[in-house]
Amino acid sequence: MRLVWQLAAVALIAFLGGQALNAADGTPWLVLVIGLATAVLAVIAYRWVVAKTERRPVTELGRPGAVGQTSLGTLLGVVMFGFVIANIAFLGHYTVDGLGSPGGAVGLLGFMAAAAVTEELLFRGVLLRIVEGRFGSGIALASVSLLFGLIHLVNPNATLWGAVAIAIEAGGMLGAAYIATRNLWLPIGLHFGWNTAASALFSTEVSGNGTPQGLLDAATSGPVAVSGGAFGPEGSLYAVGFGALMTVVFLWIAKRRGNLQPIRRRADRTAAAATLPR
């Protein structure tokens, strides 16, 4: 039941935040405030429900190092997406025609903050962590990454390839970042930095969502393998390659730190489950 309660608590905040963002009707500063409030409330809800259902300190969202880890992740996410765009532009498939919408960029900061925090809490904080505790790091990372990719099939311009790309580059990388650090701040920062660079800075599609224009008046073109097509640069082979590379790096760090959990025998899973609060 802890899985159900934890998912329900964070999903409720995400739903209410989404409704409020829709009601804001694209007003930039209002979207920023609502998005940031949704992110903060989601963290509070996660801490509360995990502490209640598991009766332990919520170390994966501990305050020490929160600012530094989130900032590092954000910087890394922006730089990574910058490399993706640089490669697409080098081949002539990303062009900038001038300034886009600074107001739109402000609103996108709030929207992406809410999306990054709620998705990381749901997929890495709840699902990956709990599945890993029962079945080990490998099965947890593979299954939750696949689910994370499939969820993106509901987006307006989604494609099967786009879902596969998200599963590899985002699901794998963000899950591995959590396993390597055993905290959620780094993957939250990575997720936020990547999405913010894609939308607010470079004005490209984010996972086929029909993202509003950001800071630059820009466009992508060319083969799907290069630009990602209507799904956005996340469907580019460059994005998949960089994400896969970072997944390997984080898993290497996790192994060196002894953070990889092996597959647990059924008897071990039963014994562990018996010690959990109901």
Image: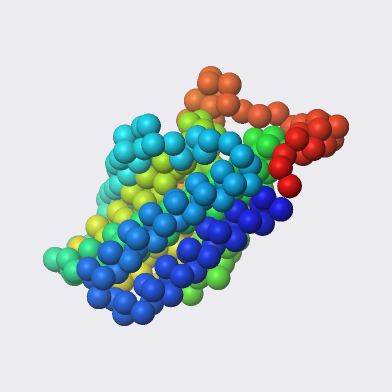
Q: Residue 122 at x, y = what percent?
A: 55, 53
Taking 210 as reference, is 130 left or right? right
Residue 269 position by quadrant:
top right
60 up-or-down from 88: above or below: above
Residue 209 position by quadrant:
bottom left
Rendered image coloring scheme: rainbow
Residue 111 position by quadrant:
bottom left
Kindly tell me whether residue 7 is visible in this rendering: yes
At 33% from the left and 59% from the top, the residue drawn is: 36
- The residue positioned farthest toward the right in the image shown: 267
At 66% from the left and 29% from the top, the residue drawn is: 261
28 up-or-down from 146: above or below: below
Towards the viewer: 22 or 252: 22
Taking 139 as reference, is 255 left or right? left
At 31% from the left and 80% from the top, the residue drawn is: 25
Q: Residue 40 at x, y = what percent?
A: 38, 54
Kindly tell me whether residue 242 is visible in this rendering: no
172 up-or-down from 255: above or below: below
- The residue positioned farthest toward the left in the image shown: 98
Q: Residue 258 at x, y = what percent?
A: 58, 21
Q: Residue 195 at x, y = what percent?
A: 36, 55
48 up-or-down from 227: above or below: above
At 66% from the left and 52% from the top, the residue drawn is: 3
Taking 235 as reference, is 193 left or right? left
Q: Number of labelled discs? A: 0
